[in-house]
Structures are given as C-alpha cells and as structure tokens.
Image: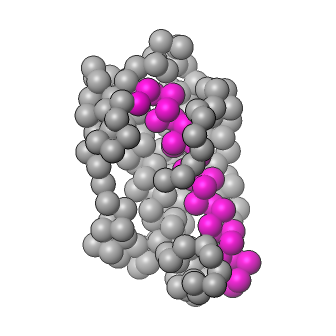
Amino acid sequence: MPITAAVDDVQTLLALYDSAPRHLTKLVEDLSAEQLSRRPDAAWNSGAWTVNEVVQHLADADTVFDHRLRRALAEENPTFAAWDENRFADALAYNDADAIAAVAIIDQIHRRSLPLLQSLTPEQCQRTATHPERGRQTVQTILHYAAHHLRHHAEFIAAKLRHL
C-alpha cells in the first residue's frame, strides 16, 4: 500500500482518522446501485475494483487496523497475520454487499476508537507489534496506515466517479 514513507505526528493522524469516514460518506451516499457496481475502464487509471468493492475493502481493512491497534496496545509485541485483500473481495462477493452498511461500519469503528486513540500517551504510541511483511511497527505507524488508507482509496473512488 503506497501511502507515504514518513509517519505523521499523532495529532495530524488523529484529525485525518476522525474526518475520513465523513469524507467517504460524502463520496458514496447518493450513488445509485449502477454507479456503485460499475466496473471501471482501464483507461480511467483508478484501479480494477468497483466503487462498492473499494468501500467493502475499506470496511474490512478498518476492522483489521482496529484489531491491530488494540492488540498492539494490549499485548506485548503481538504478531499479526497477513491478509489477501483480493481473495477477500472475491470470496466475500464485495460487489453484491451493501455499501451504505459498510460505510456505517467504518463510521462506528472510528467513533468507537477515536477516544481511545486520543487518550494515548507517547509511550503507548511507541508500543510495537510485528507485521509479517513490514516487520516491527509502532502503534503510531499502525495509526498512520489506518488514517491514510481510507483517504488513499477515497482518491480512487473520486477518480472513478469522474467517469460515471
């Protein structure tokens, strides 16, 4: 996931994490079923997934990020399992799922976790966990990925919408 190389400061990450669900909601709340499920043309340069598939991926990814953050805070250097996002999309029929329900899940995850994340001490932000592909990560690094991931994919959604 090409987010950014440098990890932002915690306050910047928290602001981004807080605003991301509202940004996603504005992008998709008024889309028709056809707009949500239309396969993008390769010339759009916006990825192969439909808008709905991206939204479903974001709901699953936010669930994973939330779980990873909580494990890193509660356990001593836990090791995370990797997951194949494309297999999830295929096996879980992302394009047939309810996009508005997925957006609601994302919103609830962020609402539930934001107070916890806002209460973190600098020491808690430096707690670690091990990712199977990225190696050792701090809570702050995991928050960085969580905060930027939704915005990153929202850019793809916006690009798709310009062609619908």
- Would you place residue 164 above or below residue 18 in this image? below
Residue shown at the point (69%, 76%) measured from the top left: 161
Q: Nearer the viewer, residue 115 or 128?
A: 128
Q: Nearer the viewer, residue 2 or 69?
A: 2
Q: In the rendering, at what x and y percent does residue 53 appear?
A: 47, 72
Residue shown at the point (49%, 21%) measured from the top left: 125
Q: Nearer the viewer, residue 119 or 80?
A: 80
Q: Nearer the viewer, residue 85 or 94?
A: 85
Q: Is residue 101 visible?
A: no
- The quadrant in which residue 127 appears is top left
Left of 55 or right of it: where is 129?
Answer: left
- Would you place residue 3 above or below residue 74 in this image? below
Name the quarter where the C terminus is drawn.
bottom right
Residue shown at the point (46%, 57%) measured from the top left: 59
Q: Is residue 102 visible?
A: yes
Main secondary structure found in the magenta portion: helix
- The quadrant in which residue 6 appears is top right
Residue shown at the point (60%, 44%) measured from the top left: 4
Q: In the rendering, at what x and y percent does residue 17 appear?
A: 60, 40
Q: Which residues are magenta?
A: 137-164
